[in-house]
């Protein structure tokens, strides 16, 4: 629990989560000289269950539930998340600040033997943990063997190095934050691979009633990044997004206006609808919702209706 000058930050214990949390802690100390920030390392259910795809065990919320319990019980005051792992609807009683600095949004192609996705031979084995990436890979390269790959970044790289895969796809942001940018052979083009919702962004979650914590976190907020993430997450909420739905979105500022592009696809990649809308950044959530409606009307509804929806 915090005192006037101490905050406890709950974090997963993976190298990436710790790196992100340590960065946030350092920023907080820089923003507020004299503030003490302690890290509380935790292992979540999502970290423990590695033999099944996320969509079969309850979705990305498994990565943050224990951290929220720690905040509810007063053992922690805030928690840092990769925004792409945060469910589209926060549990009641929690609030979120989007960190202004967004990392690289694209997916990274990682391989020890091949320079690019296009260079992979027919039948090559590609590993990924993401239903979105699986669907897009099958859409672009139906000749490849796409296999599930769970675990933290270092575990996935080790499995690649041990020869279990010809290539793996990871978020470039995580590799860069870990100082592993040298493992990236190519960045997948946005024209073919739209990222996960809010990929590359960090969020700081805290109990909504804690106005003191909100005040400590205020310097992190940046209007443009907040608007972009707001639009993307509104798109996801409108589509009831979970790990069961292959979809992605990317919002960008262009000439003072907000442009958001998104897609919905079938798991086998055979059906895919993609479009964009743009408008005033002050209406970010409305733009995300409008794009969802546009895609549903263009064939997305039939794709979603055909999906097994075991988890919300």
Image (cartoon, grey):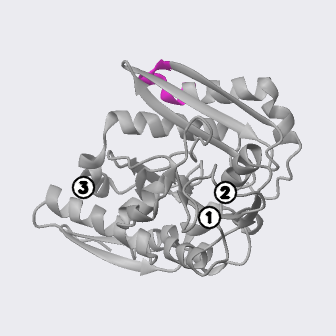
Total numbered circles: 3
Going by the image, does 178 lie left or right of 275?
left
Please state which of the two labelled residues, at mark 2 or mark 3, is closer to the viewer.
2
Left/right placement of residue 305 relative to residue 232 reads: right
Predominant SS along the magenta part: helix
Q: Kindly report the distance in space between the C-alpha atoms of the residues bearing marks 1 and 2.
A: 8 Å
**Which dot, 1 or 3, sits closer to the camera?**
1
Quarter of the picture holding the N terminus = bottom left
211, 162: nearer the viewer? 162
Sequence-wise, which precedes: disc 2 or disc 3? Answer: 2
Q: Secondary structure at mark 1?
A: strand
From this viewpoint, is residue 109 visible? yes
- Report the quarter where the C terminus lies: bottom right
Q: Please tell me how crowded label 2 is: few (under 14), some (14-19), or many (20+) other residues with Cα within 10 Å.
A: some
Q: Are marks 1 and 2 in contact (CB under 8 Å)?
A: yes
**Relative depth, front residue between 260 and 155:** 155
Are the residues at dot 1 and dot 3 in contact (C-beta closer than 8 Å)? no
Rendered image: mark on residue 216: 3
Helix, strand or loop at disc 3? helix
Which span is picked out in magenta? 279-286
Residue highlighted by disc 2: 120
**Which dot marks residue 167?**
1
Q: Position of residue 233 (x, y in %)?
A: 56, 41
Q: Measure the C-alpha gap from mark 1 to mark 3.
A: 42 Å
- The mark closer to the camera, 1 or 2, is 2
Depth check: 26 or 181 in front? 181
């Amino acid at each position: 629990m915090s005192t006037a000058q101490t905050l406890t930050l709950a974090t997963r214990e993976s190298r990436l989560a710790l790196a992100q949390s340590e960065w946030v802690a350092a920023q907080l100390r820089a923003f507020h000289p004299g503030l003490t920030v302690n890290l509380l390392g935790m292992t979540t259910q999502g970290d423990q269950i590695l033999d099944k795809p996320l969509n079969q065990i309850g979705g990305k919320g498994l990565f943050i539930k224990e951290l929220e319990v720690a905040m509810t019980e007063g053992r922690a005051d805030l928690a840092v998340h990769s925004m792409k792992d945060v469910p589209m609807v926060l549990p009641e009683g929690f609030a979120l600040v989007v960190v202004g600095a967004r990392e690289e949004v694209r997916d990274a192609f990682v391989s020890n033997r091949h320079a690019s996705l296009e260079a992979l031979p027919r039948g090559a084995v590609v590993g990924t943990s993401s239903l979105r990436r699986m669907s897009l890979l099958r859409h672009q390269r139906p000749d490849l063997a796409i296999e599930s790959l769970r675990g933290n970044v270092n575990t996935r790289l080790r499995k690649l190095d041990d020869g279990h895969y010809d290539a793996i796809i990871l978020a470039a942001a995580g590799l860069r934050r870990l100082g592993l940018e040298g493992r990236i052979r190519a960045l997948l083009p946005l024209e073919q691979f739209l990222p996960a919702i809010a990929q590359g962004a960090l969020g700081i979650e805290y109990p909504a009633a804690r106005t003191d914590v909100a005040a400590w976190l205020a310097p992190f907020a940046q209007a443009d990044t907040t608007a972009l993430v707001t639009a993307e997450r509104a798109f996801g909420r409108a589509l009831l997004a979970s790990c069961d739905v292959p979809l992605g979105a990317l919002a960008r500022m262009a000439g003072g206006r907000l442009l958001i592009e998104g897609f919905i696809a079938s798991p086998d990649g055979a059906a895919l609808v993609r479009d964009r809308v743009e408008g005033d950044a002050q209406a970010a959530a409305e733009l995300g919702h409008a794009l969802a409606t546009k895609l549903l009307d263009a064939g997305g509804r039939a794709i979603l209706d055909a999906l097994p929806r075991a988890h919300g």
